[in-house]
Image (tube, helix red, strand yellow):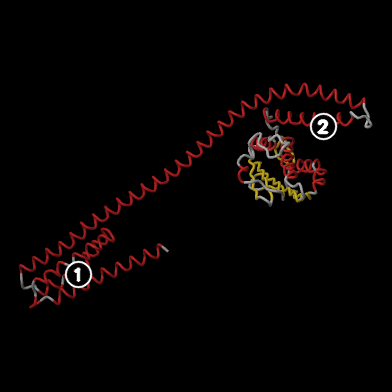
Amino acid sequence: MNRLFNRQVKGLRVYILAGLLALITVVHYLLGGARAGLLHSIFGHLYIVPIILGAYWYGIKGGISASIASTLFFSPHLFLHWQDPFLDIYNYVEIFLFLLIGVVTGILSQMERNQRSRYEHALLKLDESHRKLKEQTAVLLQTEEQLRRADRLSALGELSASMAHEIRNPLGSIKGVAEILKDDSGPEDSRYEFVRILLKETDRLNRIVQEFLGFARPKKPELQQADINEAIDSVLTLTAQEARKAGVTVDKQLSPSMGKHDIDAGQLKQAFLNLVLNALQAMPGGGVLTVKSGLRQNAIEVTVADTGTGIPEENRKKLFTPFFTTRGDGTGLGLAITSRIVKNHRGQIDMESEPGKGTTFTVRIPV
């Protein structure tokens, strides 16, 4: 649209120049001859107007073109007044001035255009530099925040590891004593229920300690040729009973052409288990759990989607932060460990959620 407008403006300017030349020529010749005088001389000088306009609008080419056109229109006047030697010399000087004014004005106009173009180019470069500076500043601030968080997590990880080791020893003793008490008492014993609760809670504490240790001292992935579908199948088999209890239907859409790739199947199984368990817990009243796998753009892509309650906007940024949880019995380490496992595979994990409609986690691992 801008190009069309520019063409229309250029066309209009050509008509204006042609009209001015025609008007000046007609009036100039009509005032010649016996009625020659001051007006005749003034209109002869008015050829300078289209010359200056042509130079201003079109640069040196426009100035020279308008000068030549003015000279052609003005030249017949030389023959009409050939008998006056002084007037002939004056007219030749007039033609020379037309050409001189056209060239000089065109050069000055072209210099101004070039300077303006340089200023505009410099302004564009300045805007681009400013934009890049803003982007780099945002990246630096984000990196600084990540480093600060990494320092805190490192210190917290070391503390968690030492505490977890200290807790595991008495937990083992407690569990051993509880199992002895369980063997010595039967279901009819009044202490049997308390012993069973003790064992259950001891196992839960041991699982939490294991998660702390897994987060504090993560293992590097041991890459071996494995099929990601087998790891997903194993996870869905482990969680099948829990899904039935929750009234959740599992929709498994695994690509048969996945093949084997260099992955740590054990670690990825843990990552997918965390995602599936979170999805099941997000659907207490039942729903549909959809698990898909496929190869896209040289990467393994696995999605775990639920039709649960969704994740509020204010919680999304904290989702992969260690120890952040919205469940009363959660440790807040499941998604943090999952994120770390995926990143150790040089992959990424993304989340999309809509409150009341569900959440989708997408894991991408380059192959």
Check disc 2 and report the residue beneath it.
200
Number of residues whose C-alpha sits closer than 10 Å to that of mark 1, classed few (under 14), some (14–19) or many (20 or more) = few
Query: Residue drawn at (38%, 65%), measured in percent from left and top?
Result: 5
- Tell me which amino acid carries mark 2: Lys
Relative placement, left or right, of 307 versus 78 is right
Check disc 1 and report the residue beneath it.
72
Quarter of the image with the N terminus in it: bottom left
Relative placement, left or right, of 333 versus 91 is right
Q: Position of residue 257 (x, y in %)?
A: 73, 48
Tag shown at residue 117: none
Disc 1 to disc 2: CB gap under 8 Å: no
Front of the two marks 1 and 2: 2
Query: Residue drawn at (33%, 65%), measured in percent from left and top?
Result: 10
Query: Residue drawn at (68%, 44%), measured in percent from left and top?
Result: 300
Q: Position of residue 282 (x, y in %)?
A: 72, 45
Q: Secondary structure at mark 1?
A: helix
Which one is in front, 98 or 82? Answer: 98
